[in-house]
Amino acid sequence: MGVLALLYLAAILLWRLPAWPALLYGGASAVCFIFYAIDKAAARAGRRRTPESTLLLLGLCCGWPGAVLAQQWLRHKSSKTSFQLAFWATVAANLAAFCWLAQR
């Protein structure tokens, strides 16, 4: 989370980035956190789960800060190695796209 904040601050200073991306990340993070919470509740209750591909896509679409919080606070999807590898790959892709777009 700190890395994102520093990256965003650097983008504001270097590239005069507008405020709307911060709102986009905040909103997407809230949605992503809710999806993780629903999936955690479904896992505990033995109900139908949210597909991992959906969780990964939400993270890729600017929701990964909320996913990181959900993984830490809810202890959900934090120990499954295959998911973590895919998740951090989506974070790297999102940050790369953010940097590329911010420079334009």
Image: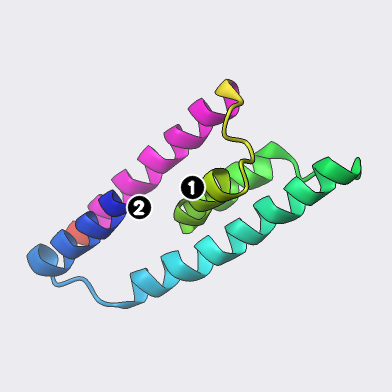
Q: Which residue is mark 1?
A: 68
Q: Is residue 94 magenta?
A: yes
Local packing at callout 1 (Cα closer than 10 Å; few below 14, some 14-19, many 20+) is: many
Query: Looking at the image, which residue is at 66% across and 61% down?
Result: 34
**Colouring convention used in this rendered image of the protein:** rainbow
The residue that appears at 74% across and 46% down in the rendered structure is: 40
Work out whether 103 lies above or below 19: above
Q: How many marks?
A: 2
Q: Which residues are magenta?
A: 82-101
Question: Which residue of the protein is positioned furthest toward the bottom in this rendering?
Answer: 19
Q: Quadrant of residue 44?
A: top right
Amino acid type, label 1: Val
Q: Secondary structure at mark 1?
A: helix
Is 7 displayed left or right of 98 in the figure? left
Q: Assign a secondary structure to mark 2.
A: loop
Our reading of the magenta stretch's main secondary structure is: helix
Labels 1 and 2: the sequence-earlier one: 2
Residue at numbered disc 2: 1
Q: Which mark is residue 33?
A: none
Residue type marked 2: Met
Q: Quadrant of residue 50?
A: top right
Horizontal side of 36 relative to 21 (left or right) equals: right
* Residue 41 image point, x, y percent: 79, 50
Q: Locate residue 1 relative to residue 52 in the image: left or right.
A: left
Q: Is residue 14 above or below residue 57?
A: below
Nearest to the observer: residue 42 or residue 63: 42
Q: Position of residue 38 (x, y in %)?
A: 75, 55
The residue sitting at 58% across, 22% down in the picture is 82
Whether tag 1 and tag 2 are in contact, CB under 8 A, the answer is: yes
Percent across and percent down for residue 76 are 64, 41
The image quadrant where one finds the C terminus is bottom left
